[in-house]
Amino acid sequence: MTSTEERPSVPEPVASAHDIAQQNRNYTMFSWSVQGGPLPPVMTGGKGSHFYDGDGQSWLDFSSQLINLNIGHQHPRMLEAIKKQVDTMCFAGPSFATEPRGKLGQKLAEVTGLAKTFFTLGGSEANENAIKIARLVTGRDKIITRYRSYHGATMGSMTASGDPRRWPVEPGVPGVVRAFDPYCYRCPFGKTPDSCGRECVSHIDEIIQMEGPDSIAAILVEGITGSNGLLVPPDDYYLKLRALCDKYGILLITDEVMSGFGRTGKWLATQHYGIKPDIVTCAKGLTSGYMPLGACIVSQPIADYFDTHMLWGGLTYSGHPVCCAAAVENLAIYEDEGLFENALELGAYLGQRLEAMKARYACVGDVRYKGLFSVLELVKDKATKEPLAPFGGTSPEMGQLAAHLRSKHVYAYSRFNFLWVCPPLVVTKEELDAGLDVYEEALALVDATLAGAVAAD
């Protein structure tokens, strides 16, 4: 593991950083943004938990880019594995067997307890194919998903999402039915943990009955909800959801694109809860972002079904040898370097610091965490739980917070009234403390702003 002291010197500033940014703006399009906005930041490299910008400044990466760079920036073993595969064979069509494809498939079966994998290029495609597979196997059409969810940007995956980014592309694909989430801080059923009867599951039972049990192919949920607030479910939620699926012969699909592969300290977030899904989708931490790869991993009964039935799906780059070789090495790095153990150990410490922030700062309404997967939910008033920014929007206070983090070169993911803490799994305690200290500075500024607004009223 690379410590702060062992990091190499920061590279010299890129002389034409502005030109690079302008060229990108002129000739490429950026995700989820108005294209005529400010110039994008320039990134030139990185090492471990840090990356470098076009001005030669080092940033502490507290979001692992898109919560995917689990082994950190520029891990030498990954670079070597990719180079070795490139020298051997860059591409094989999806109908060919290759050594890295077979090795990866076997390893995924071992760590998930499932049977076979269909490879994609990302999480959205993995979810598209999981939905397709569930419909083919069951002969049913409907998919139950949750409102506070995100499953990808392609049409089917976006329709399956509850995220407000689906609104501009609706009506989307037919057959998606949404349910409420296990959101204990803002329980949609008005319950508290001590009064809860797991209505977050029992109301899904009622939805199934109202929609027709024989029409529902699968329930699709994130292992732990990611970009819509990091909702950690009650300990018995998945046991009850698994039992509900078994009751009606419905497949359980868990989207582990963000929560899987060490982020919570285990291969899959659902492994914390003692259940096995019928289908698991993943990407991000599968290669730690070094190569584009997603996977749709299915149980033995589903794999057996396709021994005698056509799998109506295919992708030009399915099982890409360089991507698979990167994933094989990435999974080996997790084990060899004890990164899951680091996620659990530092995750426990992170949880303590987050709880202390909740107690200290008026704007911190709730904190949620599992391993190095965590979020602060920010409010204007702890008593009323009024969000610091509206669902689907932002606020001056959230802008102030984000600006302070940027000024201290801490790269963090914030959205609506949420602020994530998701550093690479190679992060050290010293790096974690350094970033969290900046978070506390930002929270103190927000508290002061809110106090000033109250005084002015």
Image (cartoon, helix red, strand yellow):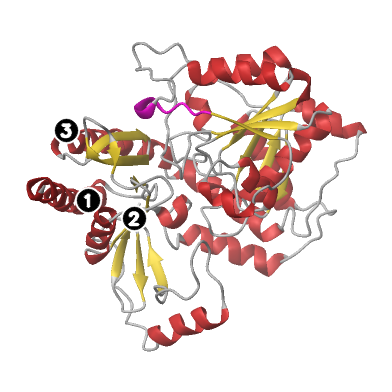
> At numbered mark 2, what does the secondary structure look like: helix, strand or loop?
loop
At 50% from the left edge and 37% from the top edge, which residue is drawn?
148
> Circle 1 is placed at which residue position?
439
Instruction: Measure the alpha-carbon separation of dots 1 and 2.
Output: 9 Å
- The answer to whether marks 2 and 3 mark residues whose Cβ atoms lie closer than 8 Å is no
What residue occupies the far left of the structure in this picture? 455
At 51% from the left edge and 44% from the top edge, which residue is drawn?
258
| Residue 117 position in % (x across, y down) | 72, 40
Which disc, if any, is residue 412?
A: 2
Instruction: Measure the alpha-carbon separation of dots 2 and 3.
Output: 22 Å
Q: Nearer the viewer, residue 279 or 182?
A: 182
Q: Is residue 240 above or below residue 185?
A: above
Instruction: Measure the alpha-carbon separation of dots 3 and 1.
Output: 14 Å
Amino acid, disc 1? Tyr
Amino acid, disc 3? Ala
Q: Residues within 10 Å of mark 2 (few under 14, many from 20)?
A: many
At 50% from the left edge and 79% from the top edge, which residue is drawn?
25
Which stretch is magenta? 180-186
At 41% from the left edge and 72% from the top edge, which residue is drawn?
43
> At numbered mark 3, what does the secondary structure look like: helix, strand or loop?
helix
| Residue 224 position in % (x across, y down) | 48, 34
Q: Nearer the viewer, residue 210 or 280?
A: 210
Q: Is residue 190 left or right of residue 23?
A: left
Q: Quadrant of residue 338?
A: top left
- The answer to whether marks 1 and 2 mark residues whose Cβ atoms lie closer than 8 Å is yes
**Mark 1 vs 2, N-terminal side:** 2
Amino acid, disc 2? Ala
| Residue 369 position in % (x across, y down) | 35, 34
> Circle 3 is placed at which residue position?
359
Give yes or no for residue 400 being in the magenta stretch: no
**Mark 2 vs 3, N-terminal side:** 3
